[in-house]
Image (spheres, rainbow, N blue to C red):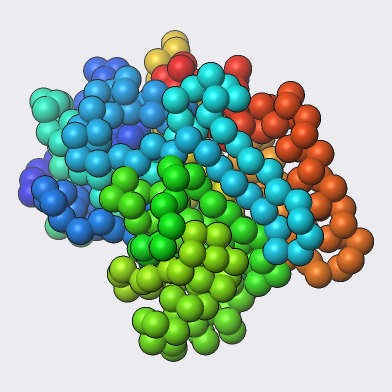
Amino acid sequence: MCSEHVTVDVVVVGAGIVGLTLANLLAKQGRSIAIVDRSEVEVFKDNQDYQSRVTAVSPGSQAIFEYVGAWSAMQSKRVSPFTDMHVWDEKGNSNIHFNANDLQRNNLGHIVENVVIQASLHENLQQQSDVEWFLPEQISKVITFQDHAELELASGSVISAKLVVGADGGRSTVRNLTEIAYTEKSYQQMGLVALVETEHPHENTAWQRFLSTGPLALLPLNNGQCSIVWSVSEDYADELMKLNEHEFANALTQASNMQLGKITLKSNCVAFPLVSGQADSMVQSRIALVGDAAHALHPLAGQGANLGFTDAAVLTDVLEHAKRDIGSLKVLRKYERARVGETQIMQSAMDTFVAAFGSSNATIVKARNVALRTADSIQPVKKFFMKHAMGLGKDRPTYAR
């Protein structure tokens, strides 16, 4: 770890999957970078056990990884393509089915373990010469000047840069030190994540059932297992976490309506609180926020990470076309204007879905069943939703094409 004064173009704070995506894009652009994180990057080992923390990588996000040269490394480890998505409601008999053939594609996306994404992006950056690493390290102060910013680190190192990017998650230190206000809302739910084995094959299909207690998703992995994301009330989560392995698996089997037969637990279950959040501003002079540091979503649609990858692509595109200082507020406002609309729309949509599908009101139940049937039967509507969720809309950023 370096203890001197380092000068670079951009400091990326956060070596998670979004921060490293941005760093790869900036390196491809020819910029000098410093990467700061409080933890070392986890190393992926051949034949290691699958992990339950996964991301549904959209084709748009895949295009970003292909552009920076990291997708082949992910493929050489393990990625799990899925061709179908089946969504149905606990109450009523309506459902909607998405198939890749509807868009003349081979798949709808890939389920990829976060460790695979992070390790592959890290390996790709190791081949770049103009990257400074500060791991593990913590930030003690962020100071902005007219023409640059300085990060003071706990070790005594100082990093000067034209731009500091906070990619350090929902509890962003960059956001806090720069006093960017953040509005957070709790769903009073917990997300339960685990690996499971199902009696029947998952058929390379992502399965999602809406329950009154919250949605349950089974995401297919290429070893035949599934990663589950089960959203439940805080009280029910406490009950579930107290069950033994057999009892938890039975509750999960019942929640899935035995769509894939009997379910067996294959890993420990991890619980985390479900919240949404939005920074009051995604930028200041010399400062930009990406990913969960800027906005957090309910995991209902699995779009949180993809939004972060798109943040990284849009910010890189804005910097590519900047005709002046890349850290100036005028330049960074272009990034904010390009992103704030989509993130707010997505948050509003998730809040609406959570409220509508969590309701037992007979009128709302009837309305959402009609909505599912209608969306499933009208191909242009279904294709529109598919393209948007897959990151294939006409307004997608340059690096996601």
Residue 292 as seen in the image, left or right of residue 38: right
In this view of the protein, which residue sits in the foreground, 73 or 168? 73
Q: Is residue 200 above or below residue 391?
A: below
Res 323 → quadrant: top left
Q: Residue at x 58, y 54 (%)?
A: 208
Place of residue 42 in the rendered image (x, y in percent of width and height, measured from the top left): 18, 53
Res 105 visible: yes
Residue 314 appears at what percent x and percent y? 48, 26
Q: Residue 6 is drawn in which quadrant?
A: top left
Q: Judge whether 129 appears above or below 240 on screen.
A: above
113 lies above or below 261: above
Q: How many marks?
A: 0
Name the residue located 52 percent from the left edge and 78 percent from the top edge.
251
- Viewer-proximal residue, 260 or 178? 260
Left or right of residue 247: residue 75:
left
Image location (x, y in percent) of residue 167:
38, 45
Closest to the observer, 377 or 347 = 377
Residue depicted at 11% across the width and 48% down the height? 46
Name the residue at the right extreme: 363
Where's residue 40, x and y in %?
17, 54
Question: Is 211 left or right of 200, judged from the image as shown?
Answer: right
Residue 324 visible from this viewpoint: no
Q: Is residue 92 above or below residue 2?
A: below
What residue sits 81% from the left and 39% below the top? Answer: 374
